Amino acid sequence: MHVILIAGGWSDEREVSLSGAAKIRMALDELGHNVSFFDPADDFKKLLATAKQADFAFINLHGTPGEDGLVQAVLDKAGCPYQGAGPAASYLALNKAASKEVFEDKGIKTPDWQIVTPTQGREAQLKLNLPVFVKPNKGGSSLGMSLVKRIEDFPAALDKVFSMCQSALVESFIPGVELTCGMLGDRPLPLIMIKPKSDADFFDYENKYAADGAEEICPAPVDDTLTKSIQQQMVTAHAALGLTGYSRGDFMVTKKGEAFLLEVNTLPGMTPTSLLPRAAANIGLSFTDLIAELIRLGMETRTH
């Protein structure tokens, strides 16, 4: 097939996108596809016309455009199938506040939260008990995130988010262990336990992408009951958001074994250190196998 590999873009996660695209390109070549690279940051005006000439689009974008559903909407107009979620589901999942409303509606625990908009400004009242995380409401890779332990640090954390032209999601800090659960098709993948470096407060950008970053253990060393509970919550969240193909959810688990879903990522990272490829490898799928399966799922979803 003629596959366009869409990566790069103009979000703060551009470099992560390009890093993953290099490995995806190798897998697509290995699968025998005719691959063309497309960067929306350079050629967005040509996206519709380019997509009309392709058999499939493999999207590896993070943030806007891509995770917000914009590229998917254009591809739908072109009649070009692609992997992963469609436009509406992508946008819903990217908006952390909106997705948390969906989780709560389905009975899935998520940390207490509030939204602070630039209109409210840095003088907005904190309605949650400290400590709290302050993060962009739409974004990933832990960019712009702060762990606020003192009320006097709250305005500066808001400023960091507002400087990214974002509203801020303020979320109660849940002490515990971080677990992540990927979805492939309609089945959950093995859990991965994430242990940040000892000097890190949380799983930040460096922990995620540095070669000597956080320790990631797959399958996670937790009991079967907790594993099945988190996997079922992930299946429910994936369906409730209207997602297809794949996704990855991040959970915090307390010492009492309570799991809280933080967010769901519709275009999981595909770098050599990324979590979903590692979970897929645990069930016997090589990286190339994973790419082939995502293409199969995308074609099945959008050509029937």
Image (spheres, grey):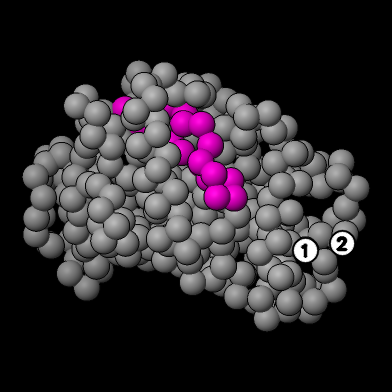
Q: What kind of secondary structure does the magenta stretch mostly adopt?
A: strand
Residue type highlighted by circle 2: His
Crowd band around label 1 with a 10 angstrom C-alpha radius: few (<14), some (14–19), many (20+)? many
Q: Is residue 97 above or below residue 152?
A: below
In percent of width and height, residue 91 lies at: 46, 67
User: Left or right: where does residue 131 sit relative to residue 198?
Assistant: left
Residue 59, magenta (yes or no): no
- Say which of 235 and 101 sits in front: 235
Residue bounds of the magenta highlight: 177-194
Cβ–Cβ under 8 Å for marks 1 and 2: yes
- Residue occupying the point 88% across, 52% down: 33
Q: Secondary structure at mark 2?
A: strand
User: Left or right: where does residue 6 sit relative to residue 159?
Assistant: right
In percent of width and height, residue 149 lies at: 15, 37
Residue type highlighted by circle 1: Phe
Residue 193, magenta (yes or no): yes
- Say which of 50 and 264 sits in front: 264
Q: Quadrant of the N terminus?
A: bottom right
- Residue occupying the point 47% across, 29% down: 192
**Residue identifier under label 2:** 2
Give the quarter of the image for residue 62: bottom right
